Every structure is written in C-alpha cells, then in structure tokens.
Image: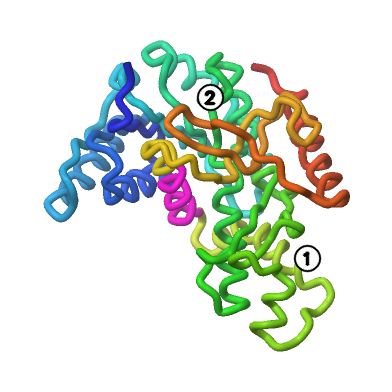
Amino acid sequence: MVEYTKCGIVGCGYVGTSIAFSLMQSELFQEMVLIDVNVEKAEGEAMDLSHGLAFASPMDIYAGTYEDLEDVGIIIITAGAGQKPGETRLDLVHKNVEIFKQIIPQITRYNQDAILLVVANPVDILTYVTQKLSGFPASRVLGSGTVLDSGRLKYMIGQKLCIDPRSVHSFVIGEHGDSELVAWSCTNVSGVPFDTMCRLRSNHTPKPGYQDDLEEKVKQSAYEIIGRKGFTNYGVAMAVKRICEGIQKDEHCILSVSSMLHGEYGMNNICIGVPCVLGKDGVEDIVILDLSREELDDLGESVSELQSVIEGLNF
C-alpha cells in the first residue's frame, strides 16, 4: 500500500532539484527519496536539502534506489536530456523515450500503485509512453502538461491589467510546446469577460491582435529563458508543487495537466494538456471547455502534430 506522505523524484538535474526544494518547503510530504543515475549527485542534493530542515518542517530526505519507491504515493519523473538553446521540446523525443524505456520498468518493478507524474520533455509524448510502458490506469499517469503555460499566461494578463494573476481564469491547452493555444473563449477575470476587463482597466478597446501577441509571448517564454540562463526550473517547480498539492490534499482542483483522452474533444489515445479534476486517485475527470470552432480546430492540429511524432516511435 502506498503512502501519500511520501514522494519520489527520479532525475536530479536543475528541474528535479528545484522541485525537491519547492516540495521541501511545502509541508506536503514527510519523506522524499531522490534517484539519479549519478548516485553521488543525488546524495549531494539530499544532503544539501537536509541541511535546511532546521528552518523548515520535519522531513526525511535521502538518496535512494528504485527499490526505495516501493511504498511511495507520487513519483515525479524529471530524468532526461534537457532542452538546449535552439531546440524545441519535440527535438528531445527520441533521446528521452530511450531513457524512459529504461526508467519505467524499474519503477513498476517495485511499485504498481503510485501516481506517476511526468515532467520531462516533450511531456505529452513521454506521458503517453509512460502510460503504455507502465500499464497503469490512465488516471494514475499524468504529465505537468500546460499548467506552467497557463501560469505564465495568468501572470502576463495580470501584468497587462495590473490585476492579481490569481484572479485570472484561463487555460493554455494542447501540446506543451509550439502548437499550444489559449482558450480565449473561456478566459475571464473573476467572472468578468477578458475584453470587458481590458476596457475597464485601460479605459480603451484593446487593439486588434493583442490576444495573439499574448499567446505568442507565452509560447516563447521558455525559449527566452533558456537563451538567457540555459534552462528553466523555478516556474515548473512551482507548477509541479501545485499539482502535488491537488493530489495529496484530495482537493478536486482543476489544472491543465497532460492526460490520456478517451473521446473527450472528439480525440482518442493521446495525452495532451486539458483541464482535469485532480484528487488522491489522480485524474478524476476531464473537463470539456466550451471552445469556439476555431479553438477546436487548433486543438485538433496540436493533437495531430503529437500523433505524427508518436507514430514514428519505437517502444
């Protein structure tokens, strides 16, 4: 039987260790095991994190092996090659699928009951691969999806309107990548339509194309950060913490994680970022947004792009 007070992180690179640091301060877990192909790296990270426990809540943080995942409730998978300047997330696919072909069987050898949370890129395809390799129910295999992209959008809208981003309600959906889209038809600020709030806060009608500009800024965010510092880590760490919180606390919150579709939005057998209800058993339900015809078409194109990549994989 798994314990949801325990989490495991597979992969101790920039993203994995930032997630570990975020979760260490969250008070969500009492135990955290770090696993990496570089054992000394995992040991060093566990030691460094543990030395901060005098200033945080009690927690057992240690480096371990896959066997230590036996009773872990949430296993976060960040292992894989990172995105380099000039690379798209899809450019990583073959390298990281090969890595996952080694990782997933080792996880499932010791644990058949955990929730698997995929964070490595391309996250939608790797979530799909994880579900197929693990044989776990689709509800217990999810990816970080477009949770971070949605957070970036809310931040940018908040900046534009001088509004707390937590009051912005909007989703980026589709691939966590270049074909993602904003569900503008469902976007509002505390129930007020986005266009109406723009006029209220800026006292003028928004210029044509302003939504396209915001959407493009969201898509380019990761490339800009990678171009400046070489990688992204803090934003995704906070997004993963929020996903874990929804699961561990059984919140029934709605986040745009990557989940397997079974007819929702007219699509099947693909993992993609859409709003999902999250609780202690993982994905409870997929929320169907009232999208415009154009948005549905764009979502279909995003799915088609991922499907074409999956068809070329060998796993």
Looking at the picture, which amino acid does disc 2 mark? Phe
Disc count in the image?
2
Q: Position of residue 84 (x, y in %)?
A: 58, 49
Q: Position of residue 42 (x, y in %)?
A: 29, 35
Look at mark 1 in the image and give the residue it sits on: 212
Viewed as shown, does residue 202 lie left or right of 278? right
Q: At x 69% / y 61%, what residue is drawn?
A: 187
Compared with residue 109, is residue 78 higher up or lower down, i.e. above or below?
below
Compared with residue 13, is residue 230 higher up or lower down, i.e. above or below?
below
- Distance in Å between CA atoms under marks 1 and 2: 35 Å
Assess disc 1: are there few (<14), some (14-19) or many (≥20) residues with their C-alpha within 10 Å of its C-alpha.
Answer: few
Color style of the picture = rainbow
Look at mark 2 in the image and give the residue it sits on: 100
Q: Position of residue 119 (x, y in %)?
A: 51, 39
Instruction: Tell me whether circle 1 and circle 2 mark residues in contact (CB < 8 Å).
Output: no
Secondary element type, mark 2 = helix
| Residue at the front extreme of this rendering | 191
Magenta extent: 232-243
Q: 52 and 31: which one is in front?
A: 31
